[in-house]
Image: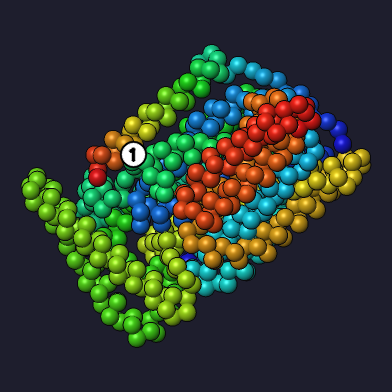
Amino acid sequence: MSTIDWIVLFATLVSIVAYGLYRSRGSDTVDRFLLAGKTMPWYAMALSIMATQASAVTFISTTGQSYVDGMRFVQFYFGLPIAMVILCATVVPAFHRAKVFTAYEYLEQRFDSKTRALASVIFLCQRGLSAGLTLYAPAIVLSAILGWPDRVTILLMGITVITYTSLGGVKAVTWSDVQQMCIIFFGLIAALVVIIRLLPQAVSFPDALYLAGAAGRLNAVTTRFDWNDRFTLWSGLIGGTFLFLSYFGCDQSQVQRYLTGSSIAQSRLGLLFNAVAKIPMQFFILFIGAMVFVFHLFVQPPILFEAAEAGRIQASRAYRPIDDQYSQAFQRRRQAAMDLLAAHHARDTAGERQRVDEYRSAQRDLDDVRTQAAMLVEDTGGERGYSDTNYIFLSFVTRYLPVGLVGLIIAVIFAATMSASAGEINSLATVTMVDLYRRYFRRSAPDHHYLMASRWATVFWGAYAIASAGLGRKLGSLIVAVNVMGSLFYGSLLGVFVLAFFFRRVGGTAAFLGMLAGEAVVFWAFFFTGISFLWYNVIGCAVVILTAFVITYWIAPGRRAEV
Amino acid sequence: MPGLREVPDEPPPFLGTWKNVYGAVLIYLVLIIAAAYAFTQALE
């Protein structure tokens, strides 16, 4: 990176932290530290919710995913507006009226303390696992660009996040999120404009769309039903609705954002803004990846996008023939793309069909050679199941974007990481303090004591996230890994909240046993079946409700109030 | 530790009632899926 890029990067990061801390002045009571004294306007909540959900993984991995697999991932978000409407109509007013700090506090009001404790522990397990992954993503960035060890980057990012989160609480998190989202929007729009301008003169924007579409990179909607396909219209609408109901209704990292609202209406508007804006935003990010694909139709990409692994396999004797094949396959695909465009411009329908087949065949050949290179990584002692998907966008940014914009895009990735990580650490600390420490260890203490406990819990979870971040290296596509981890736990959490809101006759013991059964079945499905992760939320939720019903109405019908 | 304050419920700033706002969001979802489907069909 050039000096200007470094200046842009550090100026952006310092301004984010400084602004967040400036806006968080007066966070000197538990109420203000954890819920901003319930004073936040809808637009701050809306952008904070969006920023907490959009981690660096979103930008690194999603763009790579559309480069290799097209835009099908956008369907994952089709359930979001449905979930938001349901939550705005039910959960948001209920949580506000219950005057709770956490979603799990509500479960004790409705059921009992053991159900609240189990839900809190499930949340801490799930969110604690992904907190490390959130920090790991930008570590890839700097290790790819500077050759810094991952751990140094993780430590720097983690300490920065711990500092402003433990000092300023949720207000610092929210206001820094607002600034981060503005930078993210600006950076992404600038990146797309530059990518399109980098295309060869002879390739217009409609041509780029045509080539990306012919290669299957603009396949936003898949209507066939397949249990094992992760991204279809149906898994997105049904599985996605359940996942987002769980995420926004039962995950404290999101619930805490909208509990800071100055009114129920402000909280609803914050969520509905996400319902409307999230799908276009994801579409836009995926589209960037598809345009990077088109750019590399004409400019040869590296055989592996991760420079370190690409350099390492060059020492192998098997590398040279693979590299030669790769150059030939690239030239063939480039020619096929140009021939296809020529046929398209000439409106030669028969010729176009033939050229499309050749173009797709050339693409398959190129993919095959890249697969051989990935296998060579394994054969030479590298990671099993190696994938360089997460390096595609960053490789492009650092090689081809102009000075200044590189620094800004890297800042976008850091900003996204800090916002997601701060939200996670803040919510983990809140649940630890409110649902465990205050509930089971110090039930009555001065406000200042709980404020300090919240700050120390923030430091603890920040340190834990730093320590567990190395896990990310073993998990392939990070965006999928994060969502798989969430889906292992969210179904049960959603099930117990559905029982709480809609089935008044179900008692605490039935809800508690239902959650245990839900987790057992989801883990069974994860280890022993090929069912796609989006369905785990549906399965987990259904098992919790079914088990609670069986206990309430069949096993112990005479003791309904007790169970 | 003091309790949290009561927050007011208010009507939405547009479309009159929350039910109308929710309906508008769901119509928007249908339109955006239709647009994405048309985009896929047109370019694939």
Residue A231 in view of the camera? no
Q: Residues within 10 Å of mark 1 (few under 14, many from 20)?
A: few
| Of A59 and A469, the residue lying toward us | A469
Which subunit holds the residue at mark 1? A
A356 shown above or below A559:
below
| Of A375 and A331, the residue lying toward us | A375
A135 shown above or below A192:
below
Left or right: A267, with A344 as reference point: right
Q: Position of residue A511 (x, y in %)?
A: 70, 36
Q: Residue at x 37, y 28 (%)?
A: B31
At mark 1, the secondary structure is loop
Q: Residue lying at the far right in this picture: please name it.
A: A445
Quadrant of the drawing holding the C terminus of chain A: top right
A309 shown above or below A433:
below
Q: Residue at x 49, y 32 (%)?
A: A81
B9 shown above or below A453:
above
The residue wearing badge 1 is A223
Q: Residue at x 29, y 38 (%)?
A: B39
- Scheme of image coloration: rainbow
Q: Residue at x 77, y 28 (%)?
A: A559
Residue A164 in view of the camera? yes
Q: Residue lying at the far top in this picture: please name it.
A: B16
Left or right: A68, with A120 as reference point: left
Q: Position of residue A416 (x, y in %)?
A: 55, 51
